[in-house]
Image: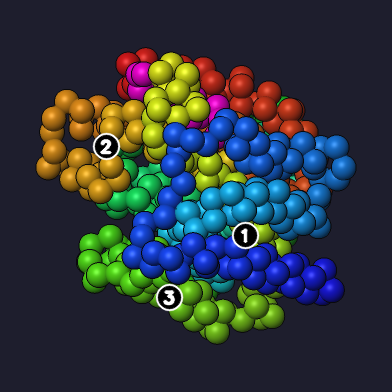
Amino acid sequence: MKSKLAFSIILCLILALTLSISMEAFAADEGGHYKVDGEILPIWSIIPFVGILLSIAIFPLVFDSHFLVHHGGKMSLAWALIFAIPYLAVFKGDAFHDILYIYLIDYIPFIVLLWGLFTVAGGILVRGTLRGTPIVNTLLLLIGTVIASWIGTTGASMLLIRPLIRANAYRKSKVHLIVFFIFLVSNIGGSLTPLGDPPLFLGFLHGVPFFWTTTALFPHMLFISVILIALFFVIDTFMFKREGGVVPDDGVNEPIRVEGLFNLVFLFGIVAAVLMSGTYKWGDVNILGVHVYWQNIARDVLIVAMGLLSLKFTPFSGELRQTNEFSWEPIEEVAKVFAGIFITIIPALTILGVGEKGALSGLIVAIKEPMHYFWVTGVLSSFLDNAPTYLTFFNTALGKLQLTEAVVPQILSGQLTDPQHLEFVRLLTAISVGAVFMGANTYIGNAPNFMVKSIAEQSGIRMPSFFGYMLWSVVILFPLFVVVTFVFLR
């Protein structure tokens, strides 16, 4: 409690410092559009961004596997200060605009959506006697893959990981169950809508139409999902037969049922809120120079309302959530860590946004074809978290083609069909597939990965180390990604 209070006080002091440094410049030209010029930012300005992401990858290995749970907020705050104080001191009002923009336009909606899906999914409980046979396990993974695009990879993971673990409590070999669950339910299954995976939601916030991903990414998702599910069935069948191929009879045969289904109403409410924000235009409100659209404010308010209604009808202390082992710890960890990621990513986004005129011109020049974007976005998503990586290369593609974010909806809806616009469609498809698919390569590639790993370990499953898990992904996923490259992205 004391640490949380101290954290809050420090955040208030940062806000006060931010305002004191920047308000003088803001008052000088209240109507101005403040944005630091990416052409003048040096490459070393992205050091705090690289630092926080490397900290996420390395510190849990060096110190403690629960490092981010106990110290993630402090680590995030430290890197945020290392970046924000000199950035504000040098660029003043422009820096203040950039920081305010990234939080109002990207971070807050990102966390609100994750919180809403996490909260509502935590109110749905699968009860009954599930026997972990290859058919049952494959069916659970198939269901999770299908629903992940609609309740989010976080929601689908939290809904189905514990039933999968309970169903296979008697099995000796369980690691492959969790690994394939992360591949399919926590990542690849979220390919079809902005609700599915955080990077796609960030794209939606920046003008990508809601159902564009459904049509653009469906062939890629179907191709790789069918292969992975078939491969899982073969591996699980082999493991099952090696252990004797017999399901023990414990005398319990409780019918399968799902409780808390009324929470589906709240899930549909979240979907409707997101669709509404992408359909209607109600004007905007100017918040210290940042234009925030009213429909986006309404969306976030509705998502919070859906989460609160879920908590009212399935209370946090109630039997249903207790049986589901629901807690705020996972979403708290994500919120604190990403608060630092989003502020430190500003220089990278700004530099990449000016394309070949910026300090990363060498990278921009080298990345030309969709397959390049697929692999660069994907590999970085494996280690740098796929949401900020997607946003980075989304801006890279715009800068390279000298396009603005304002034309993205027209391009992706087919209203603009010049070669330059069609090339952006190809590049964004590659970026989207790379960010979503390759988020499965490591534990830190996507927010649900670490949640699933932690739940599995709490249940007594000895999960592979960071690099042990990577061995699974390199052997199984990388050959499939090569095939995807030559089939879809040449």
What residue appears at the point 35 percent right and 23 percent down from the top-left corner? 370
Question: Residue 373: within the magenta?
Answer: yes
Residue at mark 2:
403
Q: CA distance from mark 2 to mark 1?
A: 32 Å
Looking at this view, is 52 or 350 the one in front?
350
Residue 183, position as x, y percentages in the image: 55, 37
The amino acid type found where label 3 is placed reads Val
Sequence-earlier tag: 1 or 3: 3
Instruction: Tell me: residue 410, above or below residue 437.
Output: below
Residue 359, position as x, y percentages in the image: 50, 27
What residue appears at the point 57 percent right and 23 percent down from the top-left corner? 476
Residues shaded magenta: 368-382
Looking at this view, is 348 or 257 the one in front?
348
**Marker disc for residue 301:** 3
Residue 478, position as x, y percentages in the image: 54, 21
| Residue at the extreme bottom | 312
Residue at mark 1:
335
Q: Is residue 333 visible?
A: yes
Q: Main secondary structure of the magenta part?
A: helix
What residue appears at the point 43 percent right and 75 percent down from the top-left corner? 301
Instruction: Tell me: residue 332, above or below residue 212.
Output: below
Left or right: residue 125 compared with residue 166: left
